[in-house]
Image: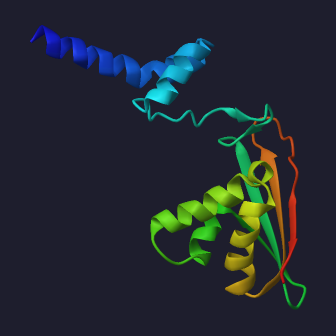
């Protein structure tokens, strides 16, 4: 019984080691948790590259159709424009929501598929604004091909 309790405590420690190491700035503990694969806990509420917080950013999507008419959407409206299972839609949201970080290699095919191929828009402009500081990040301007 003591051996079972010891292993249970060890698993709990290893599971939390990545998060504990991150918050205490103990990189040895952080990398131990990451390397052990016991710690599947992502740290979603953090900054990327020191400036982009994924949980505080508001995305605004401006679409221009073939006639020059503009439509303004937010990220919630993409749900109505896409078909398929929820997991596929999460990939679309993630690719567009992290546009300033991931770069055009990821978001270009998503924009082309959702807005150009399926809905026949001429151009797409996406702005990213931090809801806490009102700071704007690098926007995405895309012309459909």
64 relative to 67, above or below: above
Residue at the far front in the pictured view = 35
Kindly identify the residue that appears in the image at 33 percent across and 20 percent down: 12
Left or right? Give the position of 42 relative to 130. Answer: left
| Quadrant in the picture for the C terminus | bottom right
The way the protein has been coloured in the rendering is rainbow
Query: Residue 66 or 114: which is nearer the viewer?
Result: 114
Which of the 4 quarters of the picture holds residue 96?
bottom right
Kindly identify the residue that appears in the image at 78 percent across and 35 percent down: 49
Residue at the far left in the pictured view = 1
53 relative to 71, above or below: above
Q: Position of residue 93 (x, y in %)?
A: 62, 60
Kindly identify the residue that appears in the image at 86 percent across and 71 percent down: 142
73 relative to 137, above or below: below
Which of the 4 quarters of the picture holds residue 55?
top right
Query: Residue 129 or 15: which is nearer the viewer?
Result: 15
Left or right? Give the position of 4 relative to 20. Answer: left
Residue at the far bottom in the pictured view = 67
Q: Position of residue 111 (x, y in %)?
A: 73, 72
Query: Residue 120 or 145: which is nearer the viewer?
Result: 145
Q: Position of residue 62 (x, y in %)?
A: 82, 69
36 relative to 138, above or below: above
């Amino acid at each position: 019984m003591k051996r079972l309790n010891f292993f249970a405590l060890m698993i709990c420690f290893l599971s939390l080691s990545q998060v504990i190491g991150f918050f205490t700035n103990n990189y040895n503990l952080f990398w131990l948790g990451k390397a052990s694969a016991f710690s599947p806990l992502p740290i979603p509420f953090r900054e990327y590259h020191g400036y982009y917080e994924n949980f505080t950013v508001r995305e605004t999507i401006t679409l221009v159709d073939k006639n020059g008419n503009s439509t303004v959407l937010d990220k919630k409206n993409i749900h109505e424009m896409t078909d398929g299972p929820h997991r596929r839609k999460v990939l679309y949201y993630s690719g567009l929501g992290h546009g300033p970080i991931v770069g055009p290699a990821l978001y270009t095919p998503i924009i082309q598929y959702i807005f150009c191929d399926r809905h026949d828009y001429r151009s797409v402009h996406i702005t990213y604004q931090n809801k806490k500081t009102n700071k704007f990040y690098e926007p995405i301007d895309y012309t459909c091909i």
